[in-house]
Image (cartoon, rainbow, N blue to C red):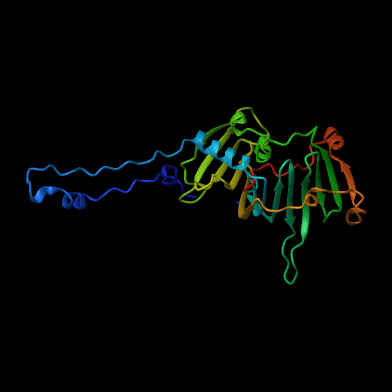
Amino acid sequence: MKKILTSLLLSSSLLVPSLALAQAQTPRGLFGWFPTPTASKRVAAAPTAAEVMAGVQKFYGGITSVKAKFRQEVTNATFGRTDVSDGTLLIKKPGNMRWQYFSKKKKGKAAVVAKDFISNGSYLYVVDYENKQVIKKDLKKNLLPTAITFLYGKGDLAADFTPELDTSGKYGGKTDFVLKLVPKASSAQYKTLHLVVDPSNYRVKESIIVDGSGNKNHFRFYEPTFGAAIEDASFQFSEKSPKVKAFRVIDGDQEADKQNAPPSAPTTPAP
């Protein structure tokens, strides 16, 4: 979830009469000396990187919920290996988020949810159904990055990133804007963050995170429904639920003190 050089100059030209039509409409037949009007064109200026970023911020500031499908491709720069995952995403303000990852499809079997990232605004639960494990993190102690929180109207992209328009043609379609965001402060999570933006409404169609080691996390979003009716129960999780009764529950905050931080929510913007 890629060719954009032309699209970054996307503009709407005002329709003007052709030169031939202009000549026909002048009284040249009666007065040969009458000057022929010169056709002129006015082209709307393409938006700047700052304007595109502001458009994205405004779009997500104006929505209350979204439901979408996604495909994630994670590429390891060292080994050149890419892992592909599919799933669904639910977001509901304020602070509710759920990423559901499906298991790999097997012949004759329907895909099931293999992993859940559930945030209710207070806690983040990483539920691994295949390994029967739950990691719980207190969001008061583990702030989500701006690349996530701006979706809830809390984070400010302009405060944390320096924007520029990417004209390399590497990401996006012919009519898309591609925004390259560089963190103003050094970050272990991001070296760069690219957003492929729909020019018609400024929603994010794709997001690409590249970290300091060159590893790439690429999301593509499909079939988004904005303003979708989503039950609050979709973002609630109980450690006492019969479904996870036999699961091992890990306090992510305590584990982080002993070793590297446990898995966190996907650090990427949504559609």
In the rendered image, residue 254, in percent from the top left (x then y), is placed at 87, 35
Left of 114 or right of it: where is 30? left
The structure residue drawn at horizontal position 71% and vertical position 50%, both measured from the top left corner, is 90
| Above or below, comparing residue 17 to residue 156 in the picture | below
Residue 180: percent from the left, percent from the top? Answer: 54, 38
Q: Residue at x 88, y 49 (%)?
A: 238
Side of 91 relative to 176 (left or right): right
> Camera-side residue: 91 or 102?
91
Q: Position of residue 158 (x, y in %)?
A: 58, 31
Using the image as rendered, state which of residue 129 and residue 22 is in the foreground.
Answer: 22
Residue positioned most to the top: 185
Which of the pair 46/195 is nearer the observer?
A: 46
For this orientation, the residue located farthest to the bottom is 108
Q: Quadrant of residue 8?
A: top left
Counting the numbered discs, the total is 0
**Residue 79 in picture, x, y percent from top left:** 65, 48
Task: Give the side of residue 230 with respect to residue 34, left or right.
Answer: right
Report the residue at 29% width, 43% height from top.
41
Query: Quadrant of the rendered structure where residue 111 is?
Result: bottom right
- Figure quadrant of residue 94: top right
Q: Is residue 79 left or right of residue 133?
A: left
Q: Residue at x 38, y 40 (%)?
A: 44
